[in-house]
Amino acid sequence: MRIRSRDNEQGEIINISSMIDVMFILIIFFLVTTTFKEEEVDHLVKLPVESRNQSLTQTAGNLIKVNIRDNGAYVVMGQAVTEEKLTEWMQEEREKKPEIKVLVRCDKESKHLYLANVMSICRFVGVPEANIAVRTEK
């Protein structure tokens, strides 16, 4: 039987491999459970190009995106809606968040009437800020 003397002891070796495993599991858990903000883009809407390369929109804060396709269809969060449904939905969102902003993404081939209707709905509901999206050439 071998007995160690306390004079030769250089210290205990700490095995940290299990702690590293736990840390990797925590990192993976946080990455999987994190919700990422998805940018709502309707690829059927072709935005007009602004000739002076200046952005007309500011996308900070609470933002509702309304897409207007070339045939006049209104699309909000991937679903086609009528003007009545759009008005009801905007009123509900305005009651939840009074400082809400609206970004209108209108196809360059659509009629001016559709854009005017959405802006009129925004004014009727009481949206404090409504912007029109354009594409800038870089």
Image: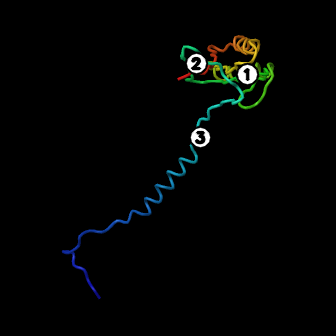
Earlier-in-chain disc, 1 versus 3: 3
In this figure, which residue is indicated by the disc labeled 2? 57
Q: Give the Cα distance between marks 2 and 3.
A: 25 Å
Q: Is residue 31 left or right of residue 19?
A: right
Q: Residue 135, image x and y in percent?
A: 60, 21
Specify the label residue 35 is tagged with.
Answer: 3
Q: Position of residue 48 (x, y in %)?
A: 65, 19
Q: Quadrant of residue 126?
A: top right
State the residue position of label 1. Answer: 68
- Crowdedness near tag 2: few (<14), some (14–19) or many (≥20) residues, C-alpha within 10 Å: some
Q: Earlier in the sequence, mark 2 or mark 3?
A: 3
- What amino acid type should be assigned to the residue bearing mark 3? Thr
Task: Residue 96: give x, y in percent of width and height.
Answer: 66, 23
| Mark 3 neighbour class, 10 Å CA radius: few under 14, some 14 to 19, many 20 or more | few
- Secondary structure category for the residue under label 1: strand
Q: CA distance from mark 1 to mark 3?
A: 27 Å
Q: Is residue 37 above or below residue 125?
A: below
Per the image, label 3 sits on a secondary structure element best described as loop
User: Which amino acid, mark 1?
Assistant: Ile
